[in-house]
Image (cartoon, rainbow, N blue to C red):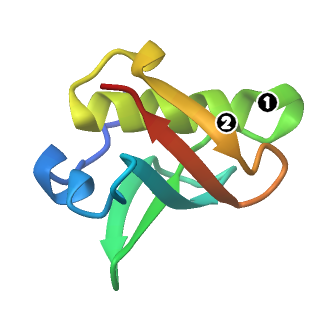
Amino acid sequence: MARPKADLPPAEAILALADERRRLALRVTPGAREESILLLDGRICVKVRARPDGGAANEAVLALLARALGVPRSALTLLRGATSREKLVQLSD
């Protein structure tokens, strides 16, 4: 049985939480049961199934965020937090 696709918030709601430089602060949970993006109290919480081994969770986070925003994966850059749950992602113009 295939797993259902993640429920994603509208791109406009995610972009509303970006700063003036189009950076998004994320709180990430790797190894989650389901993939999702939640907007809680002005924060973006991202859950991915991938484990943090070898950067797999970071790639899964960026891919899921790109899908939610409707942009290519190459439009996102991880600025800070490669080994942390708190991450800062840059969205290119």
What's the residue at 36%, 60% (across, down)? Answer: 19
What's the residue at 51%, 60% (across, down)? Answer: 25
Relative to residue 38, is residue 47 depicted above or below?
A: above
- Residue at the extreme front of the image, as rendered: 20
Q: Quadrant of residue 5?
A: top left
What's the residue at 27%, 37% (across, down)? Answer: 68
Relative to residue 35, is residue 39 depicted above or below?
A: below
> Disc 2 and disc 1: Cα gap in Å?
5 Å
| Residue type, label 1 | Gly
Contact between marks 2 and 1 (CB within 8 A): the answer is yes
Residue 75, x across and y down, in percent: 40, 20
Quarter placement of the N terminus: top left
Q: Quadrant of residue 41?
A: bottom left
Residue 80 visible in the shown view: yes
Q: Which residue is mark 2?
A: 58
Q: Foreground: 28 or 18?
A: 18
What's the residue at 19%, 54% (across, down)? Answer: 9
Q: Secondary structure at mark 1?
A: helix
Residue 32, x across and y down, in percent: 60, 54
Residue 45, x across and y down, in percent: 46, 64
Horizontal side of residue 40 vs 33, given as left or right = left
Relative to residue 25, is residue 42 depicted above or below?
A: below
Q: Secondary structure at mark 2?
A: helix
Q: Which residue is mark 1?
A: 55
| Residue type, label 2 | Asn
